[in-house]
Image: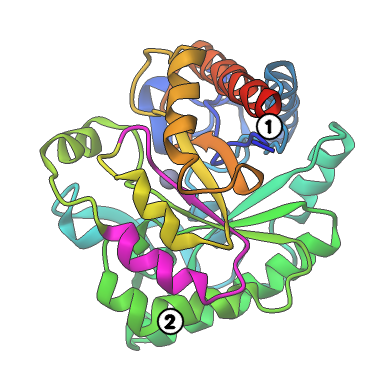
Amino acid sequence: MLTTTLAGSLPKPSWLADPRLQLFAPWGPPADRLREAQDDAVRLCLLDQEEAGIDIVSDGEQRRRHYIWGFLDGLTGTDTQRLGKKRTRGGRYVAEQEVARIVGEVTRPAPVMGPALAFAKAHTRRPIKVALPGPMTMVDTTLDEHYGQDEESLAMRFAALLNAEARDLAAAGAAVIQFDEPCFNIYLDKVKAWGIRALEAAIEGVSCTTAIHICYSYGIPRVLAWKKANTEWGQYAVTLPLLRETRIAQISVECAASGVDVALLAEARGKDILLGVIDVGTEEVESPALVAERIRKALPHVEPGRLFPCTDCGLVPRSRQAARAKLRALVEGAQMVRRELGART
Ligand code: ZN
């Protein structure tokens, strides 16, 4: 009941990547020392999560500069060095963004995240979640200079590669495989037309728990400005009933920093809800009491056994100090509500 977890990323130590450059910061250590530095950073992230008491942990995504590039770099036919420009996310946060390019046949010669999972498993006994980009978000965040096909065809191509990766990760002992699909909050017509089908292709036959993370993007200034001005928060009301018909087990939703009415979560009956109760866009640390209040608000709409207190999104833009404190608040807030529920039964 009220098992705690996080969306995925944690801030990188300054000796691994300059925190002032935030999301896509270049690596600090030279190439021949990078692997060792990443290993050390992963061990610290696991320790921070264990000390905080997080139940389902991640490697903090310490080995990827960007949540899409981390997977693309393991494929053939992609270029994450010479970037292209593209209107992404429907132009919601910025007119154009630099994106990786598709420059040849896209194949997956070997498991991409397998070695990282093996390392994390060797250093924690807790169940581990691995995040992969979702097919729709991969299409939106790449410039296709090779296939010249429609978005749906490219999404199905990515879905097949993601499925092979997810099956391998499940076989290698991942407890949860999560697909990050912020675009499911943006292109609602495409979600209906082919997004759900691409997701189903990605999770087909995957033997561990599968999850989808649908947020309103990172806690960075241009996104925060959009959130402040936004008044339409009904997107989950469209996507949750569609997801209910799929075999996805868990749905991760942003509820702390958004204007989403948690009553919408009733639309996901039968699924686990990873409820965002930690705002990732501020250094201000929530009190456990505030976290508990956010959890309680969702309880009339989600059974406690299906409610997983979680962060809204990745904590990568935050300071390490704030991120650690936010994880502790998350666990303490969940404990408060767990005690109340235990007392009632
Ligand atoms: Zn997110």
Instruction: State the quadrant of the N terminus.
Output: top right
Residue 241: in magenta span: yes
* Residue highlighted by disc 2: 154
What amino acid type should be assigned to the residue bearing mark 2?
A: Leu
In magenta, the rendered stretch is: 235-257
Q: Which mark is residue 38?
A: 1
Residue at 52% in and 77% down: 245
Crowdedness near tag 1: few (<14), some (14–19) or many (≥20) residues, C-alpha within 10 Å: many
Picture quadrant where residue 250 is located: bottom right
The Cα–Cα distance between marks 2 and 1, rounded to whole angstroms, is 32 Å
Left or right position of 95 against 46: left
Q: Where does the image place residue 177, in percent across and percent down from the top left?
A: 66, 57
Instruction: State the quadrant of the C terminus.
Output: top right
| 126 over 98 or under it: above or below | above
Left or right position of 48 against 309: right
Front residue (pair 200, 321)? 200
